[in-house]
Image (cartoon, helix red, strand yellow):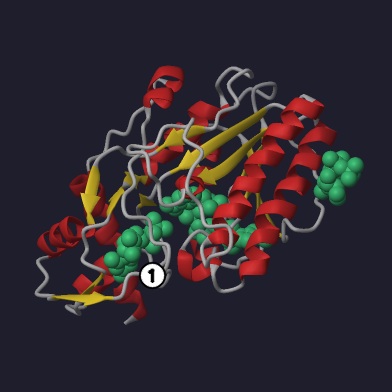
Amino acid sequence: MNYFLRKRILVTGGAGFLGSHLCERLLGEGHDVICVDNFFTGTKDNIAHLLNNPYFELMRHDVTFPLYVEVDEIYNLACPASPIHYQFDPVQTTKTSVHGAINMLGLAKRVKAKIFQASTSEVYGDPTTHPQPEHYWGNVNPIGIRSCYDEGKRCAETLFMDYRRQHGLRVKVARIFNTYGPRMHPNDGRVVSNFIVQALRNKPLTLYGEGTQTRSFCYVSDLIEGFVRLMNSPDDLAGPINLGNPGEFTMLELADTIRDLTGSRSPFVHAPLPQDDPKQRQPDITQARHHLGWEPKVALRDGLAPTIAYFEQLLERQG
Ligand code: NAD
Ligand code: UDP
Ligand code: UDP
């Protein structure tokens, strides 16, 4: 790439599921990528194929501590994302969202970088409005077991908007809805990975509650396209902007589809519904369509096929 067009881009959480796909995409566009990760939930396997690229640099670092690098853009993704992982050390989860945001915003302020925040549909909590538009303020329990994640991300959004208002920073906030694809963790307890691993092993598929709660699942390549479009959008577009696939499914429907695609003999079993589990979730993506010309292209069955193939290979390697 032309020297003047090549940007130095920092991706925090770059060794994770979404971060590794983003690093790949940015390198593919010819940029210089610095991946920062403390490997809490990410792995070197996710980025091993990038290590020989001279434009890729890996730093082991925890974003709750200050970081001094010179970059043009920052994608702040560092944060455990699945309930099992973010509830493992809830205090550290809040610190990662809040102190991590403060440090990355301080860095962006010093070097005048544009900064993107990976926020979440969890800011809507257990929503009373359906589907969820960005102007909905949410229904979040501030003291429950999901709060470390939900409130941490909400506070991070506040910080992003205040650094914009107070210091004139160029910020971009994406509210990401459930996303799936290759490089998801096999043990992070999320529904897509759980069902696929269970189906491939012909073990019972664990439906929490009745399985009538809904989620809307976005394939990773669609989401990464949305990230890049939002980052490259005009400076006056700060968001928050919903990024997700409006196709909404009950967990029973998801289980049926995965059983069908894997040809599995797994039965269904029911387990208790976790505390504060949202009953329904679907993104209203009017804003993303309008401002970014973006909408997901990959249907659930089409995205599940490569995801299942990824888990098949992973389980084979693990024996
Ligand atoms: P992930 O767990 O695979 O990736 C998170 C990465 O952050 C990991 O590599 C982890 O090691 C790293 N990390 C965690 N704490 C850190 C710290 N203190 N310092 C440095 N690195 C740290 O999860 P993911 O699914 O790739 O999620 C990436 C981001 O997107 C997260 O911020 C998450 O909240 C957000 N998000 C994801 C989804 C989804 O469905 N995957 C939905 C909404 C929001
Ligand atoms: N910071 C950082 N890298 C930088 C600049 C700042 O990690 O290049 C951190 C710094 O530790 C500080 C935080 O970002 O605590 C917020 O910085 P800001 O300048 O907004 O606030 P202040 O330094 O005045 O507290
Ligand atoms: N879920 C389930 N079985 C599982 C794992 C999850 O029925 O083995 C349900 C969970 O209760 C929730 C939905 O699937 O209603 C999505 O869970 P996930 O942890 O993937 O994402 P989140 O709740 O954070 O949206």
Numbered disc 1: secondary structure? loop
Which residue is at 47% across, 45% downward? 124
- Is 9 on the left-hand or right-hand side of 186? right
The response on whether ligand 3 sits within 8 Å of label 1 is: yes
Q: Quadrant of the C terminus?
A: bottom left
- Is 271 on the left-hand or right-hand side of 87? left
- Is 257 on the left-hand or right-hand side of 53? left
Which residue is at 51% across, 43% downward? 22
Q: Position of residue 196 (x, y in %)?
A: 25, 66
Which residue is outermost to the bottom?
Answer: 319
Quadrant of ligand 3 in image: bottom left
On screen, 272 above or below 300? below
Q: Quadrant of the N terminus?
A: top right
Q: Position of residue 271 (x, y in %)?
A: 27, 76
Q: Dot 1 corresponds to which residue?
A: 274
On screen, 138 above or below 167? below
Answer whether residue 100 is visible to the viewer in this image: yes
Q: Position of residue 217 (x, y in %)?
A: 31, 47
Q: Position of residue 219 (x, y in %)?
A: 33, 45
Count every numbered label the image shows and give the total. Answer: 1
On screen, 33 above or below 6? below
